[in-house]
Image (cartoon, helix red, strand yellow):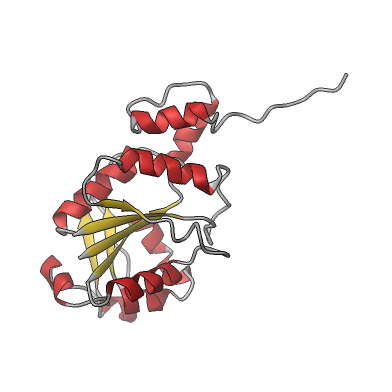
């Protein structure tokens, strides 16, 4: 099975990386595709250029077996719709089961995604939840797609829904950007290689205010 884990990764941090590693092991994935988003349809465009977010992600996972940084959304014009990403992946991997991993917050807004029902034509959806997750009232469309157990995902190509509890690391990319902008040290929130790139390229710095004479 192949997994897909998308996001702006602005910047990538241990919250992303720990959950990615856990689902790769739990679902015994052949590989996990980490796909940085160029232009998110449901939020503002990231303030850091795509090529730098890609560099940070590649640096973070360079030594992790089975993690594959996939730049297809960066190379595609227009909004980065996940349905287009899964469609292109499906064309490459034939009948290998494909798993799309999303967080519980994203799942709560799934029905606002572009052509969201077609996601199931190309992949299973795995919702990564925190301990104590209460769940949502599911539509009939989603209810009928719930997998009986994790092994069912490997027996068909796409179309199922399941929930997987993962370790909750309360690390926020927004909080990291604010921390760096205030001059504080983000060590232990992300890999040192990512911190080096942030410092080298002067990322997440407060705007410079010019005063007139």
Residue 5 x, y percent position in the rendering: 33, 56
Residue 148 x, y percent position in the rendering: 14, 73
Which one is in front, 107 or 206? 206
Examine the image and state in which quarter residue 1 appears. Answer: bottom left
Residue that appears at 14% across and 76% down: 155
Residue that appears at 24% across and 63% down: 2
- Relative height, residue 213 to residue 141 (above, below): above
Assign the C terminus to one quadrant of the image: top right
Examine the image and state in which quarter residue 209 appears. Answer: top right
Q: Residue 13, can we see it?
A: no
Residue that appears at 16% across and 59% down: 27
Residue that appears at 37% across and 31% down: 193
Which one is in front, 168 or 2? 2
Q: Give the left or right position of residue 61, taking residue 47 as reference.
A: left
Residue at the outermost top position: 213
Q: Residue 201, can we see it?
A: yes
Which one is in front, 188 or 163? 188
- Relative height, residue 168 to residue 34 (above, below): above
Residue 118 x, y percent position in the rendering: 39, 78
């Amino acid at each position: 099975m192949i997994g897909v884990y998308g996001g702006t990764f602005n910047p990538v941090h241990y919250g992303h990386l720990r959950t990615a590693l856990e689902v790769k092991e739990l679902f015994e994935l052949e590989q996990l595709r980490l796909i940085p988003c160029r232009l998110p349809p449901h939020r503002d465009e990231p303030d850091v250029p795509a090529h730098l977010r890609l560099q940070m992600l590649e640096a973070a996972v360079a030594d992790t077996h089975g993690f594959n940084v996939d730049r297809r959304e960066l190379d595609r014009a227009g909004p980065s719709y996940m349905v287009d990403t899964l469609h292109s992946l499906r064309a490459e991997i034939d009948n290998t089961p494909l798993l799309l991993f999303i967080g519980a917050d994203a799942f709560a807004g799934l029905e606002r995604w572009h052509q969201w029902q077609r996601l199931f034509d190309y992949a299973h959806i795995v919702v990564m939840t925190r301990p104590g997750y209460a769940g949502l009232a599911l539509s009939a469309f989603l209810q009928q797609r719930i997998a009986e157990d994790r092994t069912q995902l490997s027996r068909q190509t796409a179309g199922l829904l399941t929930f997987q509890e993962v370790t909750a690391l309360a690390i926020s990319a927004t909080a990291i950007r604010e921390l760096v902008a205030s001059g504080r040290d983000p060590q232990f929130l992300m890999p040192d290689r990512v911190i080096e790139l942030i410092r080298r390229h002067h990322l997440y710095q407060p705007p410079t205010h010019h005063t007139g004479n």
